[in-house]
């Protein structure tokens, strides 16, 4: 277990090139309409997270974008059920299209489901044993509110970036300590490792 007192600001004052406001759905729609899925950057992160969640029975992917991680799970032969949530219309359309093209869509309809919703207000965790937050928490101001709604004992696996992004990141995490300061009272961290330019973690909700 990693323990540290929460700082409340995620180190925001130390960082540059951060967004002053959260990017709206329309901004993400434009990104995904251009075809950006970011595979090159997220692939090692997906490899790391996938190796730790593929035995989950019901996985909830919050801020799933156009379904890159779902694609990765399909390639891994993931046997459980996956629910992806995002508020971008374009992301949801692309995720569903990708799923429908897979052989699993024919063999196991309903195994993967994509829901258009705002994760900042998401509160449906019944039956979920693993929550994935891959490059998600840095996009929302009320990240701690979201984590506080995850039922105690639920496995939470994800990643947060070390770098800022002035168009969409409201915070970043320059050090391992900054991750623990921000979330140490909400998550019991079992593992935090730097992968590419992000901190990847395995934890349980407190």
Image (cartoon, rainbow, N blue to C red):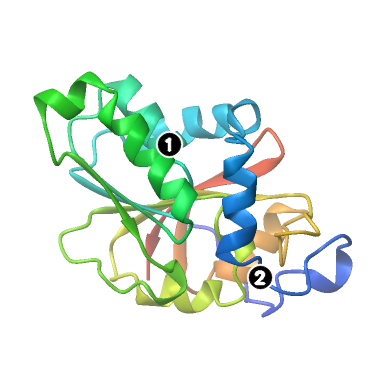
> Rounded to the nearest whole Å, what is the CA distance between mark 2 and mark 1?
23 Å
Badge number at residue 109: none
Q: Is residue 193 visible?
A: no
175 or 58, nearer to the observer? 58
To which residue does mark 1 refer?
Answer: 69
- The percent coordinates of residue 53 (x first, y second) are 33, 38
To which residue does mark 2 refer?
Answer: 22
Q: Secondary structure at mark 2?
A: loop
Q: Residue at x 57, y 35 (%)?
A: 37
75 or 31, nearer to the observer? 31
Q: Residue at x 29, y 24 (%)?
A: 101
Q: Quadrant of residue 138?
A: bottom right
Q: Quadrant of the C terminus?
A: bottom left
Q: Secondary structure at mark 1?
A: helix
Of badges 2 and 1, the one in the foreground is 2
Q: Residue at x 60, y 54 (%)?
A: 28
101 or 45, nearer to the observer? 101
166 or 187, nearer to the observer? 166
Whether residue 178 sits left or right of residue 97 in the image: it is right
Q: Residue at x 40, y 48 (%)?
A: 92
- The percent coordinates of residue 60 (x first, y second) are 31, 53
Q: Quadrant of residue 14?
A: bottom right
Whether residue 45 sits left or right of residue 19 in the image: it is left
């Amino acid at each position: 277990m990693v323990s540290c007192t929460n700082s409340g600001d995620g180190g925001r004052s130390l960082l540059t090139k951060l967004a002053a406001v959260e990017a709206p759905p329309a901004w993400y729609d434009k990104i995904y309409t251009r075809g950006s899925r970011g595979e090159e950057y997220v692939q090692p992160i997906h490899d790391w997270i996938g190796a730790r969640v593929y035995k989950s029975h019901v996985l909830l992917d919050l801020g799933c974008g156009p379904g890159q991680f779902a694609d990765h799970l399909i390639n891994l032969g993931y046997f459980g059920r996956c629910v992806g949530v995002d508020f971008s219309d374009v992301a949801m359309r692309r995720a569903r299209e990708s799923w429908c093209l897979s052989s699993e869509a024919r063999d196991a309809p309903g195994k993967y489901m994509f829901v258009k919703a705002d994760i900042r207000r998401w509160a449906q965790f019944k039956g979920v044993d693993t929550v994935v937050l891959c490059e998600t928490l840095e996009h929302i101001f009320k990240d701690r509110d979201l984590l506080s709604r995850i039922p105690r004992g639920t496995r939470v696996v994800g990643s947060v970036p070390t770098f800022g992004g002035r168009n969409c990141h409201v915070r970043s995490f320059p050090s391992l300590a900054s991750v623990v300061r921000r979330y140490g009272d909400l998550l019991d961290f079992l593992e935090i490792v730097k992968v590419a330019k992000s901190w990847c973690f395995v934890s349980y909700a407190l």
